[in-house]
Amino acid sequence: MLTLNEQEETVTDKIISAIADYIQIEPLQVAPAPVLSFLGLEIRQHQHRVLQNGKDVNLTRLEYRTLVLLASNPGIVLTRAQIFEAVWNMDSDSCQSSISTVICNLRKKIEPDSKNPTYIKTVLGVGYKFDIRNAGE
């Protein structure tokens, strides 16, 4: 698995954006679960709360919805377009920089080390996945 810095992600986003018109993507639905629990991270959907080591984490609406989408589909690689369409409820014509920004901000808030993410992994050329192997489900 490769981890990219922001500049590398931007270049990758542009490449994916250029070929996105040729790929058919199915929108994903988040199946609500009352609590998603991982080592050090708890998402209480019924309360709309995220706890990191027992302490509240303040997330924006987009950060929260992105986290719930990824954590509800652990181990599954989601494209930026799939994330954008599910979270923003819009067509994904220009989603690339928006997704990268939200993922970057989310990592700063929930990851022990945002430069070496434990939960949200970048899958080069595809998108992101919530990695339960390192999150210790």
Image: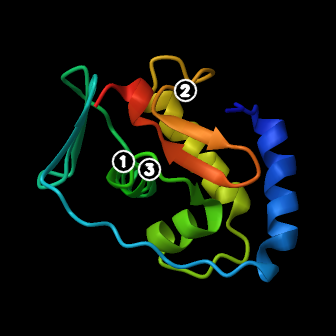
Left-right relation of 86 to 53:
right
- In the picture, measured across the screen, residue 108 lies left or right of residue 126, that is left
The answer to whether marks 1 and 2 mark residues whose Cβ atoms lie closer than 8 Å is no
Residue found at x 58% / y 48%: 128
- Mark 1 or 2, nearer chain start: 1
| Number of the front mark, 2 or 3 | 2
Q: Characterize the local packing of mark 2: few (<14), some (14-19) or many (20 or more) Cα atoms within 10 angstroms.
A: some
Looking at numbered disc 1 in the image, what kind of residue is underneath it? Ala
Amino acid residing under circle 3: Glu
Question: What amino acid is at disc 2?
Answer: Pro
Q: What residue would you read off at disc 3?
A: 63
Residue 120 drawn at (x, y percent): 51, 38
- Residue indicated by mark 2: 117
Image quadrant containing the N terminus: top right
Q: Earlier in the sequence, mark 3 or mark 1?
A: 3
**Mark 3 touches mark 1? (CB < 8 Å):** no
Vertical placement of 92 versus 68: above or below?
Answer: below
Q: Residues within 10 Å of mark 3 (few under 14, many from 20)?
A: many
Query: What residue lies at 70% left-to-right and 31% top-to-bottom?
Result: 3
Residue 67: x and y in percent read 40, 48
Q: Can you identify the residue that label 1 sits on? A: 71
As helix, strand or loop, the secondary structure at mark 2 comes to: loop
User: How far is mark 3 from mark 1, CA to CA?
Assistant: 12 Å
